[in-house]
Image (cartoon, helix red, strand yellow):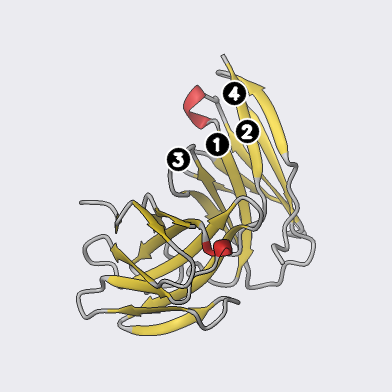
Amino acid sequence: KAGVTQTPRYLIKTRGQQVTLSCSPISGHRSVSWYQQTPGQGLQFLFEYFSETQRNKGNFPGRFSGRQFSNSRSEMNVSTLELGDSALYLCASSPGTGRYNEQFFGPGTRLTVL
Amino acid sequence: DAKTTQPNSMESNEEEPVHLPCNHSTISGTDYIHWYRQLPSQGPEYVIHGLTSNVNNRMASLAIAEDRKSSTLILHRATLRDAAVYYCIRSEGAQKLVFGQGTRLTINP
């Protein structure tokens, strides 16, 4: 099975712009979670989608949003970019059902805001 | 609030066992204990998880204290490829992981 893929792998934007990142989960996985990783704050949970519905949400401002499509692919959007949004954005997928599901992470999208 | 405490760094030698400790004194009865690791320039990778009993898999063993307030990840025979940041996480579900700062493990040849 192919792993979790994220596009693009690298992105450079300027302050005030918006950005959309994409994540394709492992085939058959219905849950997609997003995380932000920075040197200062470490790995922080953004949100989780399951069957096109947001099921969990982290403590991030409304500028961060996401969605999931019927084929389980997910996108996250950040509007009005700030310098502090520079980070590695990681997507993880799991089957999403059952008592426990390990998460499979993609390689991430590195976003640089200038 | 990561809710777990781990040493910032540890060092071991290749082919020796490694014991990575984690304190989770405020764990609730329904929280799982998960371990993930992150190799350089990669996303995190699942290692093992447990609830109450000790667990073994092909990668590692997880020893959970009887009161569940601490646990230890055991790598039985470390290789250079095991050099990574190891995260101990406790959460009720597997879908929302709250990562702490982790333990940076260095393996000496």
Q: Which mark is residue B41?
A: 3
Q: What type is the residue that disc 2 sits on?
A: Leu
Q: CA distance from mark 3 to mark 2?
A: 15 Å
User: Same chain, marks 3 and 2?
Assistant: yes
Which badge, 1 or 3, comes first in the chain's sequence? 3
> What's the CA distance linking mark 4 and mark 3?
17 Å
Check disc 1: other Cα within 10 Å, few if <14, some if 14-19, many if 20+.
many
Q: Which mark is residue B84?
A: 1
Q: Secondary structure at mark 4?
A: strand
Amino acid type indicated by mark 3: Ser
Front residue of A87 and A104: A87
Q: Are marks 1 and 2 in contact (CB under 8 Å)?
A: yes
Let me know if marks 1 and 3 both belong to one chain. Answer: yes
Q: CA distance from mark 1 to mark 3?
A: 10 Å
- Lower position in the chain sequence, tag 1 or tag 4: 1
Mark identifier at residue A101: none
